[in-house]
Amino acid sequence: MDDQKESLRKIITTLALKNEEIQNFICCLKQSLDNLEANSNQVQEDLESEFSSLHAVLYELKEGMVTRIKQERASRTYELQSQLSACTKALESSEELLELANQTLCSPENDSFNQVPVTMAPAFRLSLKAKASDSMNHMMVDFTQERNMLQAIKFLPVPATPEIHLAECQVFDNTVTVVWTLPEPDSKIEHYILEYRRTNHDGPPRAREDYPWMVVEGIKETEYTLTNLRFDTRYMTFRVKACNKAVAGEFSEPVTLETHAFVFKLDAGSAHQNLKVEDLSVEWDSSGGKVAVQDIRKEKNRTSSPMHSPARTAMMSPKRAPSARVGRDRFTAESYTVLGDTMIDAGQYYWEVRYDKESKAFAAGVALRSLGRFDQLGKSNASWCIHLNNWLQQSLTAKHNNKARTLDCPIPDRIGIYCNYEEGELNYKYDKMSKIVPQLMLKLTC
């Protein structure tokens, strides 16, 4: 009996949920009907407006052409009437002279014969060629092509859905180029709309995400390059849709692209004895000098850091994989320094440095292979760094070749370092409470 009640409860619960779904669907259908009515009225108004505009254009064109015909007729009428008037007067004059000449010819007096000016008659000076033609064929219009165009007017189709070609998309450091195509060429497409947003999970895109869509409108080509993205960040589609003058099509299937960061480990074998180094962290160790003998013994047996060690999980720069750095002597004296285990010899790389709020001072940057074991970062021509002083008065300073430049910005929570080997550029980005402060760019000269 209890099992039957439990089964009935489940059926009731399932049916109640189904009823709720049906009610929601009914609401959606009613809303769709309302939207259909409103949208139909709107497109009908737009169509009537377009045809009215077309009628207005045709009427204006007709009025202009009729005016030109009237002007041409008036001009030719004036020319022909003027010529007709001149011919009529010349004919009247000639008839008078002809009558006078006949009378003189019949007269027996010779003196009156010499006084007749027959040779001066206007008829002899008159042109008998019409000054204007009566043909108006040059004012005729052939509307065959325009009529065919009007008969070809149809409703604009909804643009096809683009397809993003994942294999052709390019991801370089903090730049992503998205490439897509339409199933068939469409001359009616005016532009594309690209949307992208961050996601913090692996796998296929989800219906709901923590981050909003970022929109790029007015794209004329079938590819677009986004720059200044955050490194080591996953983006969920890049999705794109095509738009013509009237309507936008459906979004493409979303794709997931990722901008990789340059990740490396610290080489404990190069570290000063007073530094305690793990894979990705370093801290001050005041007792380091007391175990110098052990460190020296370890250093004798140390080899260059393996590039593909099992413990290494670094993602290489997408442009070129960096090279493993060969071993070198440990830093000593007042050079409290540790090197990364990877050498930069080509390409572009980015990494970030986070630090403990209790840290009194530290520096982060890049150095040439010629950096000496006694050299401090930023105090020779072989290194560039950002130095943070967190003692009594906080300060942030860019240093190179023993020259310092104080930076007028808040003390950051982390420092981003971007190195472009080919261009010889070193950029520092400061992040304070997730707000990027304008970056500092240094030129590397070797």
Image: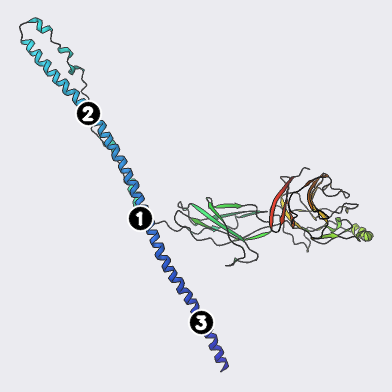
**Which mark is nearer the camera, 1 or 2?**
1
- Residue 416 occupies quadrant: bottom right
The image position of residue 55, as x and y in percent, is: 33, 49
Between marks 3 and 2, how big is the CA–CA gap? 95 Å
What is the number of the mark on residue 245? none
The image position of residue 88, as x and y in percent, is: 16, 23
Type of amino acid at the residue the image marks with label 3: Ala
**Residue bearing the label numbered 3:** 16
Left or right: residue 78 compared with residue 177: left
Residue at 7 percent across and 10 percent down: it is: 105
Q: Secondary structure at mark 1?
A: helix
Type of amino acid at the residue the image marks with label 1: Glu
What is the number of the mark on residue 80? 2
Residue at 86 percent across and 55 percent down: it is: 270
**Residue bearing the label numbered 1:** 48
Q: Residue furthest front?
A: 392
